[in-house]
Amino acid sequence: MRFLAVALALLMSVGVGAAPVAAEPAARHQIGFDKYSLTLDGRRQVIWSGEFHPYRLPSPDLWLDVLQKMKATGYNAVSVYFDWGYHSPAPGVYDFTGVRDMDRLLDLAARVGLYVIARPGPYINAEATGGGFPGWLSTQAGRARSDAPDYLAAADEWLTRIDRIIARHQYTDGGGSVILYQIENELSATGTSQQNYVAHLHDKVRADGIDVPVFHNDKGRNGIWVPASSDVPGTVPGKVDLYAFDGYPGGSCHTDGTPGSPNAAPDWGLYGPGGAKGGASASPNTPGFAAEFGGGWFDYWGSNGTYPCTAVREGPGYERVFYGTNLANGLTIQNFYMTFGGTSWGWLPAPVVYTSYDYGAAIDEARQLRPKALTMKEMGYLIATVPQLSTMDRAAAVTPSSAAVKVYHNANPDTGTQLYVPTHSPSNATTDDTFTFPLSTPDGSFTVPQAGTLRLNGQDAKLLLADLDLAGQHLVYSTSEIMAAAGGAVLLHGRPGEDGETVLRYTTKPRVDVLAGDVTATWSGHDLRLDYRHDGLARVRISGGGRSDVTLLLADDATADTFWRVDGNSGPLLVRGPDLVRTARTWLGGTALTGDTKRPTDLEVWGARGLLLSWNGALVPAVPTRSGSLRAVTQLPGPVDPRLPALTGWRTAPGSPEAASGYDDSTWAVADRTATNSTTKPPAGQPVLTADDYGFSTGDVWYRGHYQGVVPDQLSLRYGGGGAGMLQAWLDGQYLGENVLPSALASPPTTGTATFTVPESLRGDGPHVLSVMVRDDGHNEDGGVNDAHKEGRGLISVTLNGTSWRIQGGRPDPVRGPLNSGGLAGERDGWHLPGFPDRDWAPATVPAATADPGTTWYRTTFDLRVPAGQDTSVGLTIGDPGRPRSGGHYRALIFVNGWNLGQYIADVGPQHTFALPTGILDPHGRNTLAIAVTSDGGPGNGLENVTLTNLGSARGGVPVHLVTSPGYRCQSLC
């Protein structure tokens, strides 16, 4: 026993972190490129990247969780938008601490072993408020995304700050793993002003020390902003090194949330139409580069909730067809948007999205791997295993036996390795088709398969290799797809129940031992042909024949997906069983692994050192097998029930004191400006009321208008509210009603006019007070380069001339940032914060049968006791998640430990469940929940049932420290 303890200590002492891409900080590295691919220190590399936005996961320790999951599921790069507005509450003020620590993010990416594509804008779009512009930018006179001096000065201010961070993490100087840098995004205007702007951005980032290749992302393949090396007619050159484009061609979901029919995969490279609008053909001397290729799609206020459907519509079949077609077309830099979508918490969403930015991505909002993530793993591992895919030309046309099938055929000009990609013809067909195809290499000519059946059933494509040297073997061809090679084993896979055929060449007849499964071996000439069905896991040990010994693992897809290829300190390992393998470290006597299990599971390792094996720090008894692996003799344990508590002990207080006629607004700002740079100017003679002009850019804003005279029988209030924005009004303390902007549209109206009939009793001559609250659900994006982000928020105009106005909004939280809080009285007074003294509030029952008009606050606390060493993702659910809309005319802001984690709108929908990130949520202690309910008032318009929901549990995870969450006392002292 003492020996085991000492051995485990030695095993753990070598550490469990993955080797970073940049191993030696002082070493210089070279990044090059040609028409085929990027080269890193002369080594060609297919970039298989996923999009991840750290600002949509406000718990920095969880960044490591997501990055490790990306690495484990086959990605070798991460693309990161940096949101200007997330870091800057005011001109000249920037915050890169806490949840905004981008140094930490880039350190983690290098530590995990992911290259980084940095995308700092200045404009990012990204369905973020203002497209990533800070709220204060909306008051500038000059046109954004142009060479206007005031805009360039502001953009330079941002770039100076963010480039200082990115420059420290470049692959070229050994400081990190940043290999590409994007200037601007989807800049569709190409006039002189934009030409000057792009050149300015290029020169600015170079002056800031950015020396990796620079590119722009062209929305929709218009051939704009191509490098000078392109001479393709119809293109627009820009000061960039690479040309990149985006596309989201994968099909959609019906409005009822069910999958639509698949689309056909486009040819945007070698097999495309060519020319300026053909995708990669716009820049024939640089690699095919999809800076954004659809990994899902966003959802909008008032939909029926399409994220689960999108994850299916753009699921495994879509990935195989579309991403495989991209590989066949020579797109060797692919970034999949999104891979983890996360949460548009606080006031981060643009008007076109609600809180959840799940996106139907491979990793869901609760950080759980979807089935489509495992297909990405299959393809990503293939790319890592077969570097020859980085250099491919079109090869001789291949005619399959069935007209219902087409086969892309490429060849590596250096090694002769051949890639065959059979798809349906057309590729959006979902029929069940069998076929053969001719294959000719220096090894001979064959009709494939020689025995059995090759088929495409449903939405499917296959990535088949021929003439390939791998793991000491020579592959003539295989109708199985290669997934990984490590530790003397090669893993191949195919669709469940389909036949497979693998042919290997040897100088002499090798020994073949079928260790498991039903496999037939045929020896002819110098070729060993294995025929089998993809059903579970077959194991074949091949020895002799003039080559090194190898174990072939022949699996169906589901079984193959239980394997993990993980880079250890002494080379790659192949691990079977767990739900995730994060890291591996080996030494002469053993192997230490970390990862997750979601249920009791096997553990088997190829490439392990010695006989000692540990999992998450605990020794695991293991024995060697005939397959060349080390197998645990008992299963790894899974998670336990976290026993989430019921939410009780609610207390409540009214939250719209501003509505009262006698409320003291003397400290509020006077709204009396006469000029604005907003695109929604007031009528002549009326004051400027738009909130941004008074420094209020997020959330709710209150107005109080003092009027002397007779009030007309109707009042009309024009306002800007963003997506599903809302206005409520009171006259002399009496509620007039509310107006909600229409939703259920992908591009919803963001301004509107509320018209209220004034009760006769309130129309008389005398002093009157009109109290108005406007909910701002985000600034427009500026995708059209037309200053759309300057559209007014809050009141724009009111048909009550002669009114004197005062305005009050929120102030930035010094820790949680500028997008956390709005201007509700409760927010201004800290009612959402931990420690607020709510003892004098009235006890409350939730669900509430009715509500008063305006805002009502609810508060409670709850204790969590998630077991140590377990990662449980917790959600908060309001109402019935089985119904997109409840019908109640109210909305709720959800604050957990002071953090605004989302907005629920009962009669708009569709979101009912809100992810609560661990770190903001204390999984081992007390948490404070505050909900601000803004209602139209009356029965049926009160807060529905509120529960905690287990969104996924795993034994394992990463260590998570609590995010700094100042409480009420701190705020009052600060």
Image (spheres, rainbow, N blue to C red):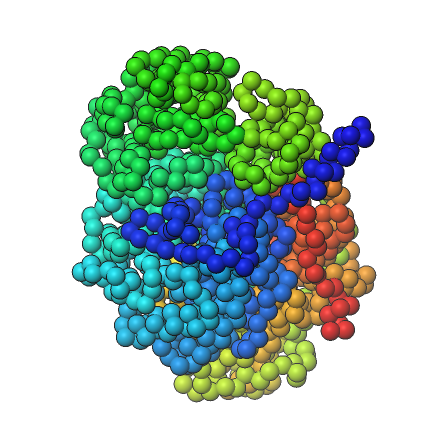
Q: Residue at x 53, y 48 (%)?
A: 113
**How many numbered markers are drawn?**
0
Q: Position of residue 443 (x, y in %)?
A: 27, 25
Q: In the image, is residue 647 above or below residue 619? A: below
Residue 699 sits in quarter: bottom right
Query: Is 97 placed left or right of 458 in the picture?
Result: right
Asked whether residue 881 is in view, the answer is no
Asked whether residue 918 is in view, the answer is yes
Outermost residue to the left: 233
Q: Position of residue 571 (x, y in %)?
A: 53, 38
Query: Is 88 placed left or right of 248 in the picture?
Result: right
The front one of 348 and 944 is 348
Q: Residue at x 20, y 29 (%)?
A: 399
The front one of 920 and 104 is 104
Q: Quadrant of the C terminus?
A: bottom right
Q: Quadrant of the N terminus?
A: top right
Q: Residue at x 76, y 30 (%)?
A: 4
The front one of 27 and 553 is 27
Query: Is 698 placed left or right of 281 in the picture?
Result: right
Q: Position of residue 244 (x, y in %)?
A: 34, 56
Query: Is 720 placed left or right of 958 in the picture?
Result: left
Q: Position of residue 375 (x, y in %)?
A: 45, 36
The front one of 663 and 575 is 575
Q: Residue at x 75, y 66 (%)?
A: 968
Q: In the image, is residue 858 above or below residue 971? A: above
Q: In the image, is residue 24 above or below residue 209? A: above
